[in-house]
Amino acid sequence: MNEYLMKLAEDFKISFTNNFITDDRWQYLTKGLLVTLEITFFAVLIGIILGFIIAVIRTTYDKTKKFKVLNAICKLYITIIRGTPVVLQLLIIYYVVFATVAVDKVLAAVVAFGLNSAAYVAEIVRSGIMSVDPGQMEAGRSLGFTYGKTMWYIVLPQAFKNILPALGNEFIVLLKETSVSGYIALADLTKGGEYIRSRTYDAFMPLIAVALIYLGIVMLLTYLVNKLERRLSKSDRG
């Protein structure tokens, strides 16, 4: 039994050295991780900003019937984005939209994933706004606030607390979706694992390492979202 365990340990050591130490192959994972985090961060920013704008336009139309044309454009945009695969959107952005422009692959990925996330964020925020008691809007208007100020100072803060778990989940999904960036030959985290596998012909260790890194990031994000949610709940009770 001891000899078997020693053999397993020796095989693990050899495999680990071959996959990560030889030729500094671990750098493919660290560099890929930085690319993945960069894409996710800026795509989240685009998703939040554009998503909130779309959500406000759509809810404003629902409540006041203003922005009819903009609302129709937003509905069409959401339908197209939610009805097509994110991989296809990435390929269209890079090979069609930016076909005649020497654009950086990271920028193309940020745009593609940001536009994709915005459609889902918009619907999440819209559902959060619509879940707020209509009396809150009426109360704000009765205090002399404009529609915009009532939305910004009264409705949106309450909606944000309601949708925080769903938003956190959307950003976690976005992080994992960036793993398809390799379709445009972008050296992200998943591509780094694939590159090591192609050199060592050992799929287990590099792909498991990539999976563990993703899992660690997701667990960290989940912890931070839960912590923020608890803090907001305490402020409500206070």
Image: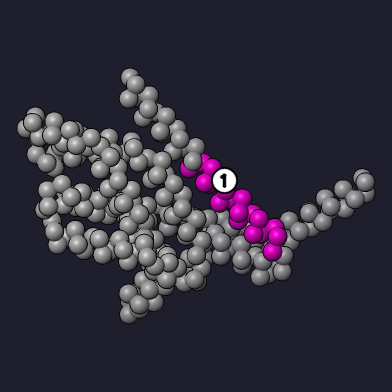
Examine the structure image and report whether residue 61 is included in the region drawn in magenta: no
Q: Nearer the viewer, residue 111 or 154?
A: 154
- Residue 153 can be seen in this image: no
Quadrant position of the C terminus in the picture = top left
Q: What is the span of residues highlighted in magenta in the rendered image? A: 203-221
Q: How is the image coloured?
A: one colour
Q: Residue 12, relative to residue 221: is it above or below?
A: below
Q: Secondary structure at mark 1?
A: helix
Q: Total label count?
A: 1
Q: Residue 92, relative to residue 149: is it above or below?
A: below
Query: On the rendered structure, is 172 left or right of 151?
Result: right
Q: Residue 184, relative to residue 10: is it above or below?
A: below
* Residue 23, x across and y down, in percent: 67, 63
Q: Main secondary structure of the magenta part?
A: helix
Callout 1 amino acid = Gly
- The residue tagged 1 is 216
Q: Residue 47, relative to residue 87: is it above or below?
A: above
Which residue is farthest bottom? 100
Q: Residue at x 33, y 48 (%)?
A: 124
Q: Which class describes the residues within 10 Å of circle 1: few (<14), some (14-19), or many (20+)? A: few
Q: Residue at x 40, y 44 (%)?
A: 166
- Residue 16 can be seen in this image: yes
* Residue 20, x across and y down, in percent: 68, 58
Which residue is farthest left? 144
Q: Nearer the viewer, residue 159 or 17?
A: 159
Q: Residue at x 39, y 67 (%)?
A: 84
* Residue 215, x across and y down, in percent: 57, 48
Q: Residue at x 49, y 71 (%)?
A: 183
Q: Nearer the viewer, residue 164 or 224?
A: 164
> Which image quadrant is residue 153 in?
top left
* Residue 38, x across and y down, in percent: 43, 55
